[in-house]
Each structure stands twice: as structure tokens, then as C-alpha cells.
């Protein structure tokens, strides 16, 4: 990193999710969260998967949809201050690879959760909590209709 050199992006928040290794880092972070939860002795596998889904979806909801603005000084006269990270992602262009990745990731986590719950008879409660969290996170990423 060169100190004192300006970046070429008007808003670096728009391209950070497409940078090298970001998706791998994201997947490894979710995997590490799950391993940490599995290492807690009194958590069963189904509890660990449920907590992984809920923590992931809550964290991504806050990071992508609740927090507005950008941590960078942008020359856009304050336009980025009014937008969430999801709205800034890829300059607001729909159906890009990073938007698809962040839309499908909670669905994939939910599928992993479903596979882990097959042998358990108490799957109903865990499944309901995890599915509700996934639906709320996935539907919050859609643009408003008005």
C-alpha cells in the first residue's frame, strides 16, 4: 500500500466485495464461526448450525442493510452517506456476481443446516428459527417496490 496516494475509485465501498480473495475470506470466516460454535462442549450439531445461521444472517443484515454511509472520504458530495452497503455494492447495478453470491450464501448455509438436522427428531424448532432468519435476510436484500 502506498501512503499518500489517492485511490482511483470515487467510492471504494462499491468494489470491495469483488476484490481478490474476498469471497474466500468470507467463506472461511463463516466456516471458522461454525467450528468455534462446534467446539463449545454443550452445543449439539443442530444448535451449532442454528447459531451459525442466525449469527451470519444477523451480521450480514446489519453490515449490508442497516448501516448507511461509507468509512472512506468520498468526493460524491455526500451521496454515499444516504445509501446502505447493499445499495452501494457494484454501483447499484443489479444481478452482478457479488450480489448473487451474497444472496445465495444464506440459502447454502440453510441447506447445510437442513442436512445436519435429518437424523434428529427435534429439528422443527431449529429449522423454524434458522429458516425465519434466512428469509428475513434474503428478502431484505431486494430493492423497495416504490
Image (cartoon, rainbow, N blue to C red):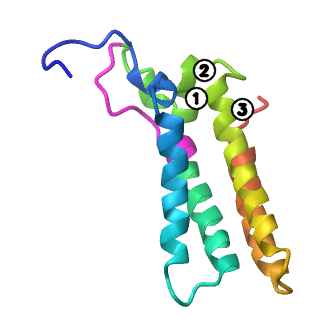
| Residue identified by numbered label 3 | 143
Tell which residue pokes out farthest to the top in this image.
8
In what element is the residue under mark 3? loop
Q: Is 127 placed left or right of 15 in the picture?
A: right
72 magenta-colored:
yes
The part of the image, by quadrant, that contains residue 38 is: bottom right
* Tag 3 near tag 1, CB within 8 Å: no
Position above or below: 108 against 15? below
Please report contact status of discs 1 and 2: CB closer than 8 Å, yes or no: yes
Q: Quadrant of the C terminus?
A: top right
Instruction: Find residue 92 and name its label.
Output: 2
The spot of residue 22 in percent (x, y) is 48, 35
Magenta: main secondary structure: loop
Magenta residues? 63-75
Question: Looking at the picture, does residue 9 appear above or below residue 54?
Answer: above
Marks 3 and 2: which is nearer the front?
2
Amino acid at each position: 500500500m502506498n501512503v499518500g496516494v489517492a485511490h482511483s475509485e470515487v467510492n471504494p465501498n462499491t468494489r470491495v466485495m469483488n476484490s481478490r480473495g474476498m469471497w474466500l475470506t468470507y467463506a472461511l470466516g463463516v466456516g471458522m464461526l461454525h467450528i468455534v460454535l462446534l467446539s463449545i462442549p454443550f452445543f449439539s450439531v443442530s444448535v451449532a448450525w442454528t447459531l451459525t445461521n442466525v449469527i451470519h444472517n444477523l451480521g450480514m443484515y446489519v453490515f449490508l442493510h442497516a448501516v448507511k454511509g461509507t468509512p472512506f472520504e468520498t468526493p460524491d458530495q455526500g451521496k454515499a452517506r444516504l445509501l446502505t452497503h447493499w445499495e452501494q455494492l457494484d454501483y447499484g447495478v443489479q444481478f452482478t456476481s457479488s450480489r448473487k453470491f451474497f444472496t445465495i450464501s444464506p440459502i447454502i448455509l440453510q441447506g447445510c443446516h437442513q442436512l445436519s438436522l435429518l437424523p434428529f427428531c427435534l429439528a422443527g424448532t431449529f429449522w423454524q428459527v434458522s429458516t425465519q432468519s434466512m428469509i428475513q435476510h434474503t428478502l431484505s436484500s431486494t430493492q423497495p417496490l416504490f
